[in-house]
Image (cartoon, coloured by chain):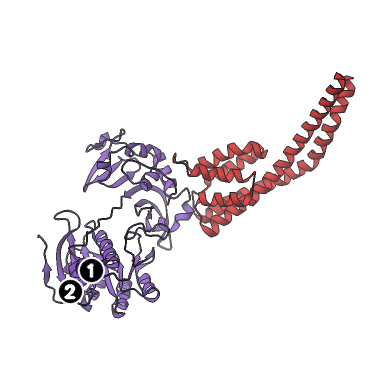
Amino acid sequence: MTDRTVTGQGLPGPLLAVLPPSLRRLVAEWPVGLAMRVEELRIRLGRPLMVGLNGRDWFVSPRGELTPVAEEAYTVHADDVARMTQLICQASLYAVEEELRSGFVTLPGGHRVGFVGRAVLEQGRVRTLKYLSGFNLRVAREVRGAADPVLPFVVDGPRRRVRHTMLVSPPGCGKTTMLRDLVRQLSDGVAALDFPGVTVGLVDERSEIAGCYRGVPQRDVGVRTDVLDGCPKAEGMLVLLRAMAPRVIATDEIGRAEDVAALEEVFHAGVSVLTTVHGASLAELARRPALRYLLGLRVVERFVFLGRTRGVGTVECIVDGHTLEVLEVPRC
Amino acid sequence: MLKMAGAILVCLSSALTGYMLAGGLTARVRSLQALLVGLQNLETEIHYGATPLPEALREVARRCGPPTAALFETAARYLGDPAGYTAGEAWQRALEEWRGEAHLRASEAAILNGLGTCLGRSDREDQVKHLRLAREQLGLCLARAEEEAARGVKLWSYLGLTAGPALVLLLL
C-alpha cells in the first residue's frame, strides 16, 4: 500500500516502510543472517513485540535483541498501532475498505499485513474493521524449485498435459508456496520433462500466490501466467475460462459449494486444474460436503499431501486420484 | 532637497503600507476561494476514486495552482516522509508553513486544523461529511472575508495614499 522508500539491512523495505519509527528502529539494524530467517512479525497492542523465526516465537527487547522472555520485551503502545494503521493504508482508511473487510493488505513484493480489530457489521456481514489492535506482518519468500519433486507426477509426459492436481495439507505446510512454484514452472516450461510452457490462468483471491500490488504480480509466476487478482475463486475461474483461453487454471483453498461448481465447469471445458485445500487426509476431505461431492466425481488425478515432518513443504505422499494408490512417499 | 526626498519616502511608504494591507484582504479572499475549490476536488478524489491521500493531495495541488497548491503539495510530501507522519500531523505541518502566505485568520486555520485531524481516518462517507462541513464553514468565512475586502481594500488603499501626504504637510 505504501509508496515510502525505506531500506534496511535485512528485512524487506516494504515491510520496514509500514512499521512506525519506534518499531522500525528495533528491527532495522538486524544482521542480514537473522533478518533473512524472519517469517513474521506480530504486533499486538499492549503486548510484547514478537517475531516468528524458523517456526518458533521470539520476543524483541527495547534494544532490538531477541529474547525468549516475554517480560524483557518491548511492549507495543497505542501510538505504535495508530501510526502503523496510517502507514499501512497510506493514511487513507477509506481507500482500503475492501481490504479491511478481508482482514489483510498486500504490500509491494507480495508481503502481507493481516490485522484484527473490532468488526463493524451490516446485515450480519463484516462491513469494516475499526479500532485495529493487532498486526501480523508475513514476509513473502519464494522457494524456487519447491515443486521439483512433484512435477513428474503432475505433468503427463507423453500427452504433454497437466493432470488435475490437488495439494492437500493443514495450514502452514507450504501449499501456497508449492502451488506458486508449480504455476511458475508449468508456465515457463520444464526442460527436464520436455514440457513446453502452457498458458496458466491464476485466480488469486487473497493475493497470496502472485502477491499482486496494484494488479501487477510481485512474485515470479511464469511468463505465460495471467493473474486475476482479488477475485472470488468461483467467479474468477469462469472469467478466465471465457476470457483468457488458459490450458491450466490454478487457484488456492477451495472448499465452498460454489467453488466446486465452478471447478466442474473447468473440468468439462478440458482445462487442467491445480488447486489447494486444507486437510490432512482424504477421509478428512470427504467429511466436508462440497469436497465429498468433488471427490465423488473422481476427476482429480493427483492428490499431493504436504506436511512438516522434515520442515515446511515436505511432500508426505502422492495419491493417484483414480486408483487411490499411493504413488510415492518420498523419503517417508 | 533633503526634505523633498524625505517627503517622497514618507508618501511612498504610506501608500505601500496601504496597498499591502489591502492586498492582504484580497489575498485572503483568493486563498479561501482556492481552498474551497481544492477541498471540493479532494472530496471528488476520495468519494469517487478512493484515491489514497498522498496521491489525492498531489492531484488536488496540480489542479489548484499556486499558492494554494503549496498546502496540498506539502502535506503530500510529509505523508511520504519515512519519519511516518500521520495524516493529521502532515496536514498540520503543511498548514503552519502555508498559513502566513495565505493571510488566513486564526479561526479559518482552526477549521482546516480540525479537518486535518479527521483526514483519512474513516470510510468514504464519513470523509465526505467532514470535507463538506469544512467547506460550509469556510464558505461562511469567505462571505465575511469578501465583505471585509469590499470595504477594506478601498479604505486601506485611499488611506495609504492620503495619510502620507497628510503627514508630510503636518511635518512641514
Task: Return the mark for residue A321.
Answer: 2
Q: Is residue B129 left or right of residue A128?
A: right
The image quarter in which residue A292 lies: bottom left
The answer for which chain carries disc 1 is: A
Q: From the image, which quarter does the C terminus of chain A lie in?
A: bottom left
- Residue A159: x %, y % from top left: 21, 77
Q: CA distance from mark 1 to mark 2?
A: 9 Å
Q: Is residue A17 left or right of residue B153?
A: left
Q: Foreground: B136 or B156?
A: B156
Q: Are the two marked residues, 1 and 2, in contact with CB atoms closer than 8 angstroms?
A: yes
- Residue B45: x %, y % from top left: 55, 56
The image quarter in which residue A241 lies: bottom left
Task: Give the purple chain's letter.
Answer: A
| Residue sitting at x 60%, y 54% | B41
Instruction: Give the secondary structure at mark 2.
Output: loop
Q: Is residue A244 left or right of residue A94?
A: left
- Residue A114: x %, y % from top left: 35, 52
The residue tagged 1 is: A166
| 1 or 2: tag closer to the N-terminus | 1
* Residue type at the position of mark 1: Met
Q: Residue furthest left?
A: A332
Task: Return the mark for residue A311.
Answer: none
Q: Is residue A134 left or right of residue B104?
A: left
- Identify the hue of chain B: red
Instruction: Give the secondary structure at mark 1.
Output: strand
Q: Give the vertical position of A73 relative to A88 (above or below).
A: above
Whether residue A303 can be seen here: no
The answer for which chain carries disc 2 is: A
* Residue type at the position of mark 2: Gly
| Residue sitting at x 31%, y 80% | A269
